[in-house]
Image: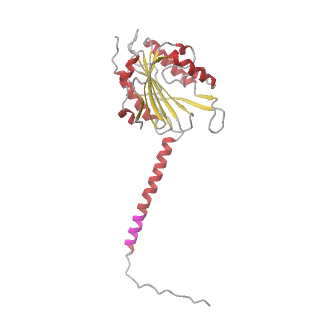
Amino acid sequence: MSEIIVEPSPAKRRGLRWWAWALIALAVVVVLSVPVLGMFAYIGHSLSETSPDQPFIDGSPQQPDAKAPLACPQRCFELDAAARIAISAEDVAQLSIQDERYGVGALEPSTVAAVAPAAGEQWLALGGDEECAFLPANAPFIAAGPGSASADPISWVQTWETDDEVVDIAARAFSTTEEASAFMRDLHERVAACPWQDLDIPTAGGLDSSLVQITSQAAIDVPNEVAAVGWVREGSPGPRWRSYVWDLQRGNLVVQVRVLTDGRILEQQVATFAELLAGRLGHLEATTP
């Protein structure tokens, strides 16, 4: 039989009272719970801000006509007036974007006729409807159709980006307020008529089409002389991505604001940012009475 060695018992010592052990246990639980709860809070925040099913703002419907339009029988604004509403690093900080890629004057102005047809041809080749050709435009124009031959000047005022998230501003000077107002009403109607587009674009999953959804945004607070039409594009380049677009009009000038985000920039932040630009547009001094 194997020998069993019995270790001697340690000398008996006076221990902590029960309530002291209870306090120590409680402290351990609290300390351990802080990083765990913090992790869940971070995960919950991340998921809510990048969720593909973020609810849209529920508000008043858009009014594509300004409450008190600034009449411009001729041009109240030339194209370079848009540079006077340029945004700063402090402005875009509210969108968590901080790097200016193209500043004012970095990109040469052009005309609708010089850029729209190529974008329109590509859009139609992808299976896009002509009525919905406002989607690929990166300035206030519609890429396909009669309006794509316009000689109106357009400019790309600024582009800011951080990682893959981008905000840019573009402008177009129409000949008159009436022409600019007609563009805004037309855009408003097109957005409502284009709830989705099924494009022939290869996707990462091997599918041969990409479903793009288009949703009209709720009205924002703008000066009486400013009209605003906004819409959201979802589904491209991925389910978490959204492109928020606002076209702002005063007199014969239309300024477009676009924000592309993977979900970390929320619709309310974009709406507040668009209101900032609309306010500056409303304070521009017209060059003609």
Tell me the colour scheme of the image. Answer: secondary structure
Which residue is the extreme one toward the top?
Answer: 73
Q: Position of residue 221 (x, y in %)?
A: 40, 27
Image spot of residue 55 (x, y percent): 51, 37
- The magenta stretch is 19-28
Residue ID at (39%, 15%): 78
**Rendering coords of residue 238 (x, y %):** 56, 37
Secondary structure, magenta segment, majority class: helix
Residue sitting at x 40%, y 36% = 98
Question: Is 222 placed above or below 51 here?
Answer: above
Apparent side of residue 198 relative to residue 104 in the rendered image (left or right): right
| Residue 53, above or below 223 | below
Give me the residue at 49% from left, 12% from top.
151
Image quadrant in which you'd find residue 135: top right
Q: Quadrant of residue 3?
A: bottom right
Task: State the quadrant of the N terminus.
Answer: bottom right
- The quadrant of the picture occupied by the C terminus is top left
Q: Nearer the viewer, residue 90 or 212?
A: 90
How many marks can you see? 0
Residue plotted at (45% across, 14% down): 174
Q: Is residue 247 above or below residue 11?
A: above
Q: In the figure, 25 relative to 235: above or below?
A: below
Question: Would you say residue 23 sits in the magenta stretch?
Answer: yes
Residue 232: percent from the left, percent from the top? 51, 30
